[in-house]
Image (spheres, rainbow, N blue to C red):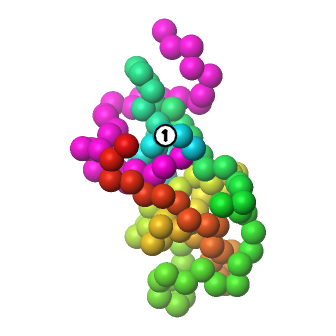
Amino acid sequence: MSTCHEPHHTHHDHQHGPKWGHTAIRHKDHVDYLHDGHLHHPHGDHVDEHQLEVSATNPDQCTPDCGGHESGHVHGPGCGHEAVPHGDHVDYLVGGHLHHPHGDHCDDHGPVEQVTSP
């Protein structure tokens, strides 16, 4: 029985790691894996649910234009970019940055470090 106090992803029946094809992101002192809009951290016999914290590096603020994709692109489910939990909302990973849909534009919520192996 685990004594972990992190939220767990229930009914998780596959592995995460450098060989499993999920985008790996450096988060604090470890690596998490993006999977279907979740940020998963393998932890012993279970998988923890993580989210990127709002911080100076990854703020939650309005920016005039985040760029990195064609004009008029709208982020959301099925937009072609991976969803990333950030604070109390969802951002989308575009060119190593978090993009957040906001009215008629998207905000740049800062960079993330993608890694090829932990």
From the viewer's perspective, is residue 3 above or below residue 61?
Answer: above
From the viewer's perspective, is 113 left or right of 6? left
Q: Is 77 covered by the magenta stretch? A: no
How many numbered discs? Answer: 1
From the viewer's perspective, is 42 left or right of 63? left
Q: Main secondary structure of the magenta part?
A: loop
Residue 108, horizontal then vertical, whole percent: 63, 73
Q: Mark 1 points at which residue?
A: 30
Q: Quadrant of residue 50?
A: top right
Q: In the image shown, does 23 or 111 lie closer to the viewer?
A: 111
Q: Which residue lies furthest to the left in this view?
A: 19
Q: In the image shown, does 115 or 13 lie closer to the viewer?
A: 115
Q: Quadrant of residue 6?
A: top right
From the viewer's perspective, is residue 100 above or below residue 87?
Answer: below
Magenta residues, start to end: 1-27
The quarter in which the C terminus is drawn is top left
